[in-house]
């Protein structure tokens, strides 16, 4: 075997190879350091674990709260986010937005299902990086239901929701067929890991044990402390983020049923106050109803100053229409402004329009009943003269000479048929019933109607 001599081609190649390796070693060290970023080992002990509750109904208020909570978790440079889930579901559109929030988060998430993750709750859990389930907890049964709780059989709606569930499962490496079977009863599935088959006509719902066995949960945890230990954060601080009092109130106020009720109170109260003024209470209650509606939507971020200003303009236009005749133009503009502000302040235009329609119909019925009961106090009475100035009330348009009835006198002028007669020492303007009475003829008063005094010739009176 010959050894490469210095200066030979082989020696030069070996030297260049060694030099290249030496130069690349620092770069390799840098790469190795970068590749560990984001792992538990590289996270400082000061980085907290943030626990965010996902309880009760999934709706727009919860969505806004989670957006705030995720933002605060990022600002705190959190190591992990634990979604504490116990919900029967809610709005599909809100669940989809929450799912996007979880997927796009820079902080890894783990869903801790310690009660029920039903319907939209299942979708939220499936979007998390990991899932832990508490004893007795369940996940699944994600059928699409309407406001009354009845299952929807619309094929397009079911297909869309099933595809969303399937995508969420695939994203985290879970069996997509199981997720689809949680939504669509027409999808039968065989769960080999637990020797169970869910036939067509039934929805998949997994217990904690079953979820772990089929790969839909990474672990079971008795409480949050076990979840923290599972993600390797036992030595990290734990921060619990809860909804503020205003957020809790806004979540309640933005529910469809409550929002409809507030609109009904607002419309009925203001219309009653406008058309049957003088009470004050209906107007105050109406403004309070609208105020709570806009307050709830303002807190969750749907309503802004523009919508509130548009609402105020609408009310002002309606008030002006009551007192200034504009042939209905101001009234129509006012109604359009009111309705537009309500719809613009809502999360869903379709839902807002439905709420507004129901509220308007109910309000019209109540207003009609109220006006019929208190019609004597209606604003229209200001433009109609209804008072009578009667003698019984002490009013007279002229002096009534009922004291002359039956008295006799003498014609001072010819009565054709009007003229003047003397009754005693008094000269009186009189008329006849149409006949002519000459001067100096005796007359008698036969009728007194206000200032009209009727006489006849004295010899014509039949006794």
Image (spheres, grey):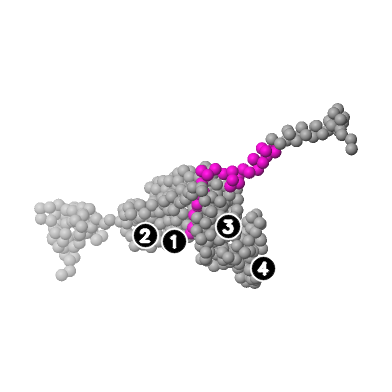
Q: Which residue: 55% across, 64% down?
A: 138
Q: Secondary structure at mark 4?
A: helix
For marks 1 and 2, give the CA distance.
Answer: 14 Å
> Which of these two is toward me, 202 or 24?
24
Answer whether residue 341 is visible to the viewer in this image: no
Residue at 67% of width from left, 68% of height from top?
192
Assess disc 1: are there few (<14), some (14-19) or many (≥20) residues with their C-alpha within 10 Å of its C-alpha: some
Residue 440, image quadrant? bottom left
Name the residue that disc number 2 marks: 371
- Please name the residue that numbered disc 1 is placed on: 362
- Disc 1 and disc 4: Cα gap in Å? 54 Å
Label located before the other in sequence (2 or 3):
3
Please provide percent x and percent y for residue 421: 16, 54
Q: Which residues are magenta?
A: 27-56
**Sequence order check: which comes first, mark 1 or mark 4?**
4
Q: Disc 3 marks which residue?
A: 131
Marker disc for residue 80: none
Q: Is residue 372 magenta-colored?
A: no
Residue 423 percent location from the top left of the image: 13, 56
Q: Where's residue 303, x and y in %?
A: 48, 47
Front residue of this view, candidates 372 and 48: 48
**Residue denoted by label 4:** 192
């Amino acid at each position: 075997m010959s050894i490469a001599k210095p200066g030979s081609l082989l020696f030069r190649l070996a030297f260049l190879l060694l030099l290249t390796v030496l130069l690349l070693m620092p770069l390799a060290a840098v790469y190795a350091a970068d590749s560990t970023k984001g792992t538990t080992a590289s996270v400082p002990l000061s980085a907290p674990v943030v626990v965010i509750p996902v309880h009760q109904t999934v709706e727009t208020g919860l969505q806004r709260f989670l957006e705030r909570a995720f933002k605060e978790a990022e600002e705190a440079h959190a190591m992990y986010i634990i979604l504490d889930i116990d919900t029967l579901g809610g709005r599909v559109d809100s669940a989809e937005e929450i799912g996007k929030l979880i997927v796009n988060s820079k902080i890894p998430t783990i869903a801790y299902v310690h009660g029920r993750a039903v319907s939209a709750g299942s979708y939220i859990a499936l979007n998390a990086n990991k899932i832990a389930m508490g004893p007795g907890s369940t996940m699944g049964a994600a059928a699409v239901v309407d406001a009354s709780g009845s299952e929807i059989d619309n094929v397009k709606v079911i297909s869309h929701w099933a595809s969303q569930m399937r995508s969420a499962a695939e994203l985290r490496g879970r069996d997509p067929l199981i997720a689809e079977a949680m939504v669509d009863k027409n999808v039968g599935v065989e769960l080999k890991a637990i020797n169970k088959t869910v036939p067509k006509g039934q929805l998949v719902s997994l217990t904690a044990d079953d979820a772990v066995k089929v790969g839909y949960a990474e672990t079971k945890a008795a409480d949050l402390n076990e979840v923290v230990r599972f993600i390797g954060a036992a030595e990290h601080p734990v921060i619990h983020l809860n909804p503020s009092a205003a957020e809790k109130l806004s979540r309640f106020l933005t529910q469809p049923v409550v929002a409809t009720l507030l609109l009904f109170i607002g419309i009925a109260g203001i219309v009653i106050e406008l058309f049957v003024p003088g009470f004050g209470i209906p107007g105050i209650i109406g403004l309070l109803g609208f105020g709570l509606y806009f307050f709830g939507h303002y807190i969750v971020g749907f309503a802004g100053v523009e919508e509130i200003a548009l609402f105020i303009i609408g009310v002002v236009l309606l008030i002006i229409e009551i007192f200034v005749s504009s042939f209905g133009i101001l009234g129509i503009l006012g109604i359009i402004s009111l309705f537009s502000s309500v719809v613009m302040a809502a999360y869903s235009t379709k839902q807002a329009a439905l709420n507004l329609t129901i509220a308007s119909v109910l309000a019209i019925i109540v207003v009609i009943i109220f006006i019929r009961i208190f019609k004597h106090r209606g604003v229209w009475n200001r433009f109609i003269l209804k008072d009578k100035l009667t003698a019984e009330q002490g009013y007279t348009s002229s002096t009534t000479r009922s004291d002359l009835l039956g008295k006799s006198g003498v014609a001072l002028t010819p009565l054709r048929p009007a003229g003047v007669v003397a009754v005693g020492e008094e000269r009186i303007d009189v008329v006849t019933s149409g006949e002519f009475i000459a001067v100096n003829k005796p007359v008698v008063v036969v009728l007194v109607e206000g200032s009209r005094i009727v006489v006849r010739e004295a010899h014509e009176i039949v006794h």
